[in-house]
Amino acid sequence: MPLLSQDEALARARRIVEASPAGETEVTLDGVVDRFVRFADCGPTQSADRERCDVAVRVRVGTPGVDAREARASSGSLDEGALRAALERALALAQASPPDPELAPLGGPVDVAETALQRPTMDHTFREKVRWVEHALARTRERELFPAGLIETSGMTRTIVNSAGRAVHGERSRAAFSLTASSGVDSGLAAGSGFGAAIASNVEDIDPGRVVERATRKAVASRDPVAIEPGEYTVVLEPAAVGALLLFTGYRGFGARELEEKGSFLCGRLGRRAFSAGLSIRDDAAHEVYPGFLFDGEGSPRRRTALVERGELRGPVTDARWAKRLGIANTGHARPQPSARGPAPENLVVAPGDASLEELVAGVERGLLVTQLHCTSMIEPLGLTLTGTTRNGTFLIEDGSLAAPVRNLRFTQSLVEALGRVRRVGREPEVAGAPFSGEIVCPALCIDGFRFTSTTDLRAPALSSRP
Amino acid sequence: MMDAAEIAVDAALAAGADYADARACRTSRESLTLRNGALASARAPDEAGLGVRVLKGGVLGFAAAPATPAEASRVARELGRRAARVAADLAPARGEPVVLAGSEGEVGEYATPVEIDPFRVPLEEKLDLLRSADAALQGAPETVVRLAHLGLRRREQFQASSEGARVHQVLVRSGGGIASTAAAHGQTERRSHPATGGDFRSGGFEHVLSLDLAAHGARVRDEAVALCAADPCPAGRRTLIAGGNPLALQIHESVGHATELDRVLGHEADLAGHSFATVDKLGSFRYGSPIVDLVADSTVPGGLDTRAFDDECVPSGRWHVVAGGILVGYHTSREWAGRLGEARSRAAARAEGWYDPPILRITNLSLEPGEWTLEALIADTEDGAILVDGVKTWSIDERRLNFQFTCEIGREIRGGELGRILRSPTYQGSTPEFWRSCDAICNAQHWALFGITNCAKGNPMQAAEMSHGAAPARFRDVLFVR
C-alpha cells in the first residue's frame, strides 16, 4: 500500500491540496517498503518485512510579504480522517505562529525526469537473502571468524504537489550487504576484524561473494595486530573511510546557511584552491550508478552542482529561502520545509582518479592503509576538525607493501588541511555510507600527513586487574 | 487497538508460530523551534501502526505496517501471517535456536505521571515561552544564531503476547532548551542550557516550565561570546571535574553501550561495534574506583525510559551494572538473558516504534551520588584543574575503550575557586582508567537526570531515549589534548 503508483500518489496529494483552506498548501507523500535480515554465527538474528508511509502537509496563512506564516504536520496513514486531522493541525500551528517576512511564494510547475523502482531489488526474497547468509556463514566458519552482517532491500517513493501547480514524483531502490568478520570477540580484544560492503540501486549489481571475501580476507590479515606510535602518517583511505570524512562537508559546510552564519569551512576559502588539484566533488542526484530523488524537499529540481573543481572550493548549495536571501540561484537542495536546518547536498560524488588501490599502496614508503572509521565527529567547523578511530583492518605500509596489521588508532585532523594534501585519487568509486550522514560515491584517497593522536588499546595491566 | 494486537498474535499462531507478540502504537508529537526569533520549525506528526514478532523454527520473524483503528484488524491478520512466513523462510540458515528467557504473561497498565498535559497547553502559550527565551538571548552583536525549542511526545502502546501478556502503556515526554552561537575573533562558539540539545524527561509540560529557559538566556549568550575570546584549553595531564551533562554522556557511551549483552557477544559488530566488557570479566573486573556505583533503573521518576514494562512485556526493574567499582551486571532482553544463565530478562528490549523489531537497549543508567558539595569539591582541588560543562562533540572507539570528549566550556580552578574560561576543553582516555581515577562525587543536591534523545543502535539503525543521572565528579590525571 505505501508505494503508490505515480498517478495514484499525485491524485491523492492533489485532493488534499484542493481540500485545504490555506492560502498556500504543499503535500508530500513518502512511502517505504523494506525487507532486511541481520545475521551472526548462529544464522539469522533479526529480520523485518515492513512498510510505512508519511503524508506531510505544509500550509501557509496570511498575506505574503506582510504576515504570512507556515507550519507542517504529518500523518503516518493514508486514511482520509487522519489526513484531515493533519491538515487541521498544520493550520492551527500556522495560525498561532509569528509572521515570517522572508517567505517567498511556493514554486510553480517544474520538469523532473521520471524514475522507476528496480524490479530485481523490489522482488528480492528472504529465501534469496538466506543464500547470501549461508555463504557468509560458511566462509567465516572456514576461517574461524565471527560474522555479523546485514542484507537489506528497500523501495522508496516521494511525491510533492503544491497549490502553485508543482507536481513531482520519484522512485528509487536501494540494496545493501555488509559483513564484519572478527576474531577475539570473547576476550574483548577484537584481535582481528575485517569489513566488506556493497550498496547499489539494483541488487543484481551486488556480488555477495566479493563482499564476503573482502571482509574475511581482511579479518585474517589483521589478526594479531601490532601497536604503533601515534603521529603523522601518509594514509591510504579506502572508500568507506573516505565517505565517513567527506560526508561532513555536506552535513556541515557546503550549505548556504552555514556559510552565511560563519560556521562553514567555506568561510574565507570560497573560490580559492584550498584542496589538492586532483580532487573534484559534485552533488549529483542523477548519478548514473546510484541516483537519488531528482527533486528536493520543496519539489525543486536538484541541480548538478560543482562543489570542488580541481581543488577550488565552489558552492554553496541553496534552497528557495537562501537563494532569495543571497540573491543567487536555487540549486535545489532544500530539506522538507519549514526546517531549522539549512540546505545541504545529499548526493555527493567524488570524481575518480587514475590509481588502483594497489597502486595507491605501492606509492607509499611508510604509512597506513585504513579500511573503515568509527564514530567520527566534528570538533570545530571552520577547519572541519574531525576525530574518530580506525576499525576493521588497519595496516602498516612499508616500501609500498602491507607490512603488518596494526592496532586501531584515534585520529584528530582538520579535514580542510588533509584535503589539501591529497597525493593521489583512486579510480574505483564505491557507494559508502556512514551512520547519521547519508551516502556518498567516492574512491580511495592517498593523503599525506594525517594526524593520529592516540592508540585505542586497553593497557595490559588493566586486563589482568582484579579488585 | 488491543484487539488488533491480539488478532495479530492469533494469526501468527494459526500460521504455525511457536510464540508471537504484537505492539500497536499511536504516537503524537509536537515540536516548535524559534531560530533567530523566527519560527524555523513547527511540526506535529502523528502516526499509528502495528508490529508483530514471531518465533518459529527457532528464528525470529517480524512484520509491520501502518494501521489506523478502522483498518487495524485486517492489517493485524495479514501481519501475523507475514511475520510467520519470514521466520519460516529464514529457518534453514539458523543454527542454535533462539530461546526466550522466562515466560512473561503479565497483565498491566501504566501511564507516565503528568501534571500538565503538554498537548492541552495552548500553542500561543508555548510560543510565548519560546519568544521570551529568545528575547533573553538577544543583545550581543557577536551572536549569529539564537535557538529556543521544545519537543513533546505522547505514545500509547497496546502489547499482547501468546503467553497471555496484555499491557497498555501511555508514555509522555516533554522538554526543550536554548542555545546561542557567537562568532568573533575568528572563532565560532556555542553555549546551551540546560544541556546540549536541550533536556527531556518523562512527564508533562511542567518539566518545560521548570527549565526556566528565559532566566538563563543572558548567561548563555554571554558565555558564547566570552568563549570566542577565551584561551584554548591547555594540553597535558591534569585533574578534571566533569559536570553532570558531559558525565551523563560519558556514562552512556563508556558504560551503557559497553554493557549491552548483544554487543558484548559480537552481534552488533556490523555497525555499533564490539565491547571490551566481556562476560569473563563479570563479577571481578575493576571498572571504576570503589566509590563508583552505576545503577540501571527503568522505574526512576522522570527517566526517558521509565515505564512499567519493556517491549517484551517484562516488568521494569533496578539493578547494579557497576557496584563498588566492579562490573556486576549487563543490560539484557529475553533473547540474551539465558546466555548469562539468568532466568529472567532485565527488561531492556525496546523498539523505536511499531515499525521496528525490539532490540536490546540501554535503560536509564545513573552514577550514584557521593558526599561532596560542588563548592567544597572545587575548594579541595588543586590549581590548574579544569571543570567542564556542555558537550560539543564526542567519539569513542568500537570496543568502548578509547574516548574523546570536547565540551562547550572549561573553567580553570585557581585558589580553590573557578577562574578563567577556557575554549574547547578536550580530553581523551581509556574507559576503565578514567572511571578508576574517580576520587570524588558530589552529593544528591547536585544530582540530576539528563535525557538522551538520539541513542543510535541496530542495523538498520533505531533511535532510543533514556536518561542518565549524575552529579559533578572529579577524575585525576586525565589527558587533555589540543
Image: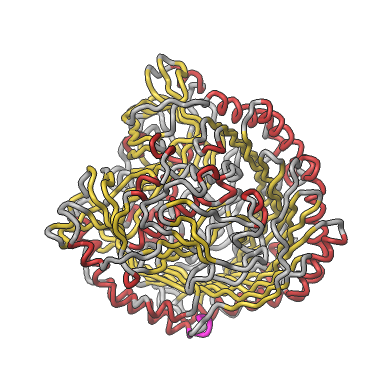
Residue at far front of view = A467
Taking depth in this image into account, of B226 and A60 the one nearest to the observer is B226
- Which residue is pictured at 73% across the width and 53% down the height? A49
State whether residue B426 is above or below residue A109: above
Residue at far left of view = B415
Taking depth in this image into account, of A381 and A409 the one nearest to the observer is A409
On screen, residue A157 versus residue A433, left or right, reads right
The tally of labels here is 0
Q: Magenta-highlighted stretch: main secondary structure?
A: loop
Check the image and tell me how it is coloured: secondary structure
- The answer to whether residue A106 is visible is yes
Which quadrant holds residue B161?
bottom right
- Which residue is pictured at 53% across the width and 30% down the height? A192
Spot occupied by residue A358 in the image (x, y as percentages of width and height): 50, 19
On screen, residue A290 versus residue A2, left or right, reads left
- The answer to whether residue A439 is visible is no
State whether residue B30 is above or below residue A191: below
Taking depth in this image into account, of B76 and B324 the one nearest to the observer is B324
Spot occupied by residue A1 in the image (x, y as percentages of width and height): 75, 61
Magenta-drawn stretch contains A202: no
* Residues drawn in magenta: B118-122
Spot occupied by residue A148 in the image (x, y as percentages of width and height): 62, 40
